[in-house]
């Protein structure tokens, strides 16, 4: 049985390798510390079984599997330290996982189970279950949020990409989209605007201000649970106390 | 209940002291006239003072009723003035009667008209009395309210402190346990014991240390080093650490667990997401009368993503630290987070220097 070990921590990889040593039929074809290396190794070595850490620096274990073609999919035993929701998903899809620190008897039974699947060539079934898990684990739902806004200026319609927006300012019944050194006036309310933007990228900091967090260069804590934000272009924005919970969460 | 018991004597004390003082002033005023008018003026003043004193009790009942019923002030004032006038009438009449008797003059309608002056005077006394009564009541209510607000603030503060108790990141905890498990399975008992001790030290600090207590930086650095040793064992070559601790800052008092969350923030969000790793720098120095600490990393900054399009910076540690600094130093501190364009993240904290007690210092 050809096995690949993927974990970003050297000690964690060693733990798996040590436990595999007792099995003479196991050949360790490689160890990877990153998701990218794992994808390359799976394609190059086509292992039967992969011990796959879920939290890795460059991409998650799920993303590694997501980028594989169906015919490249090996049997997988997931490794995870702590993630309630992921564990529930594993249970639902009857996939094997090991909790860190790894328990020897669980390790053995997971390995036995994987060996059975590989021998019985139950791959299509396994592959289907992994696909289902990936679906449930949620492909980034980018389509839920607007990526572009159409702004009419006189006869022209300008398309403003959400990505280009530095910050948004309320302006009566309109919002002012500040993108680079241009501003675009859009008829929209702040609440509607906020709900259309990806909350992992845009942060409402004030009743009348939304900012794209990647534009923030400096954050100064003020008294009273307020902050002063300095953007890449030097613009200074003050957060309001009533939005301090959101800011705390982001921090 | 207890409060009521406490207040009854207070009413009596004020009542007796007030009227006693009033009686003394009247006596002093009467003294020069004694030779000339003698018994007449004494009879008048004695009856006047005593009857107004007696009338202050029904006045008290009325005022208390107005107060307890929370009567709006224009109406309460009107009723208090009216009651004062009504109570003044019998007092003035009684005093005038006593005066007439002492003068051995007949009691007639005309002779009684001189009581009118007394009515005005007694009304004025009663209005003053009720004015004092309401002022004292207001003052007491204000005091109680102030106490209540202070109590509520103390409770809120306590609740906030409880929420601020810093917790180790569960990922870190379980991954560390996993590393120890590997060391044990390899028979590396020295390495395993070392890591266990470091983890225990760190757990002890997060569980026992009062996060609003201030400890010497020297001790805080110790906690940070325990944490860093574990991270180094886990991340290996990928993690570089540079500590530049100015010796004069070692005895400066800092909030317990100030550094560890900041360093963890830098490692988790700056170093871990980068396959090639990076360097975490901790620098402390004194700037005049202020202590300054810088925690920076050269890893990914805010604008990077971990491939999932997910933001990689942040975490409870930072919000928690910001809140604690606020509670401890109010406006007298500075916290600045900086994401330089070239990547990485730099957090600077500054607050006034307090040195630890020299007797507590370890050699």
Image (tube, grey):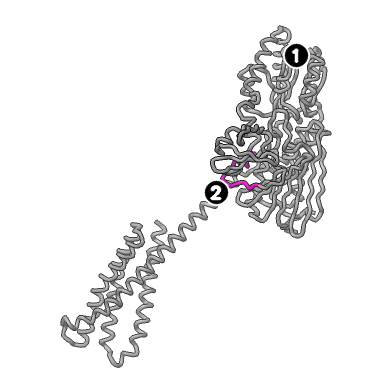
The residue at the point 39 percent across, 70 percent down is B14
Give the answer, above or below, for where B26 lies relative to A8: below
Based on the picture, tell me whether residue A149 belongs to the magenta stretch. no
Is residue A199 found left or right of B223 in the rendered image? left
Instruction: Give the residue pinned by disc 1.
Output: A72
Mark 1 crowdedness (10 Å alpha carbons): few <14, some 14-19, many ≥20? some
Q: Is residue B190 visible?
A: no
Identify the element where label 2 is drawn.
helix
User: Measured from the top left, where is residue B336 in percent x and y?
Assistant: 71, 48
Q: Which residues are magenta?
A: A237-251
| Quadrant in which the C terminus of chain A is drawn | top right
Q: Quadrant for residue B42, please give it.
A: bottom left
Specify the farthest residue to the front.
A155
Give the answer, above or below, for where A60 lies relative to B319: above
Instruction: Give the residue pinned by disc 2.
Output: B156
- For the residues marked 1 and 2, what is the alpha-carbon distance in whole angstroms? 57 Å
């Amino acid at each position: 049985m050809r096995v690949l070990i993927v974990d970003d921590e050297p000690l964690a990889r060693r733990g798996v390798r040590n436990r595999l040593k007792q099995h003479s039929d196991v050949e360790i074809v490689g160890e990877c510390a990153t998701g990218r290396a794992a994808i390359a190794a799976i394609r190059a070595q086509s292992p039967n079984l992969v011990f796959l850490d879920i939290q890795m620096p460059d991409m998650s274990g799920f993303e590694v599997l997501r980028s594989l073609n169906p015919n490249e999919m090996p049997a997988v035993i997931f490794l995870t330290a702590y993630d309630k929701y992921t564990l529930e998903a594993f249970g639902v899809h009857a996939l094997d996982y090991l909790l860190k620190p790894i328990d020897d008897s669980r390790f053995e039974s997971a390995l036995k189970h994987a060996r059975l699947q590989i021998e019985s060539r139950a791959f299509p079934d396994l592959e289907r279950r992994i696909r289902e898990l990936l679906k449930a684990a949620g492909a980034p739902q980018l389509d839920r949020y607007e990526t572009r806004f159409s702004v009419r200026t006189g006869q022209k319609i300008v398309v403003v990409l959400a990505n280009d927006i530095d910050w948004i300012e309320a302006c009566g019944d309109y919002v002012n989209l500040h993108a680079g050194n241009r501003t675009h006036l859009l008829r929209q309310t702040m609440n509607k605007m906020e709900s259309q933007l990806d909350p992992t990228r845009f942060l409402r900091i004030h009743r009348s201000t939304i900012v794209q967090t990647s534009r923030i260069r400096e954050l100064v804590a003020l008294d009273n649970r307020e902050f002063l934000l300095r953007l890449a272009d030097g613009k200074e924005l003050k957060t309001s106390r009533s939005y301090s919970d959101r800011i705390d969460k982001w921090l | 209940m207890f409060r009521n018991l406490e207040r009854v004597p207070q009413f009596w004390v004020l009542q007796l002291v007030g009227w006693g003082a009033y009686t003394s002033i009247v006596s002093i005023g009467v003294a020069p006239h004694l030779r000339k008018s003698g018994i007449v003026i004494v009879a008048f003043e004695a009856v006047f003072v005593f009857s107004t004193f007696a009338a202050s009790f029904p006045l008290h009942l009325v005022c208390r009723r107005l107060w307890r019923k929370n009567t709006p002030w224009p109406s309460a004032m009107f009723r208090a003035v009216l009651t004062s006038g009504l109570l003044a009438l019998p007092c003035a009449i009684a005093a005038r009667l006593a005066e007439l008797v002492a003068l051995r003059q007949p009691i007639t309608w005309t002779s009684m008209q001189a009581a009118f002056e007394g009515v005005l005077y007694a009304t004025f006394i009663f209005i003053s009395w009720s004015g004092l009564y309401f002022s004292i009541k207001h003052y007491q209510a204000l005091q109680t309210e102030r106490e209540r607000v202070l109590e509520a603030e103390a409770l809120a503060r306590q609740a906030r402190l409880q929420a601020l108790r810093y917790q180790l990141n569960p990922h870190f905890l379980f991954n560390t346990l996993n590393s120890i498990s590997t060391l044990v399975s390899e028979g590396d008992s020295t390495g395993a014991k070392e890591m266990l001790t470091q983890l225990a030290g760190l757990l002890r600090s997060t569980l026992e240390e009062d996060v609003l207590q201030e400890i010497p930086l020297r001790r805080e650095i110790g906690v940070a080093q325990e944490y860093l040793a574990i991270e180094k064992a886990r991340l290996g070559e990928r993690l570089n650490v540079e500590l530049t601790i100015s010796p004069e800052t070692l005895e400066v008092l800092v909030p317990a667990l100030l550094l560890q969350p900041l360093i963890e923030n830098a490692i988790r969000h700056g170093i871990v997401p980068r396959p090639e790793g990076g360097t975490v720098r901790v620098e402390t120095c004194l700037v005049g009368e202020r202590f300054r600490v810088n925690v920076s990393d050269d890893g990914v900054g805010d604008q990077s993503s971990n491939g999932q399009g997910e933001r990689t910076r942040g975490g409870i540690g930072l919000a928690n630290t910001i809140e604690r600094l606020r509670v401890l130093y109010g406006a007298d501190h500075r916290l600045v987070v900086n994401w330089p364009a070239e990547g990485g993240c730099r957090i600077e904290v500054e607050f006034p220097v307090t040195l630890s007690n020299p007797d507590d210092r370890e050699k």
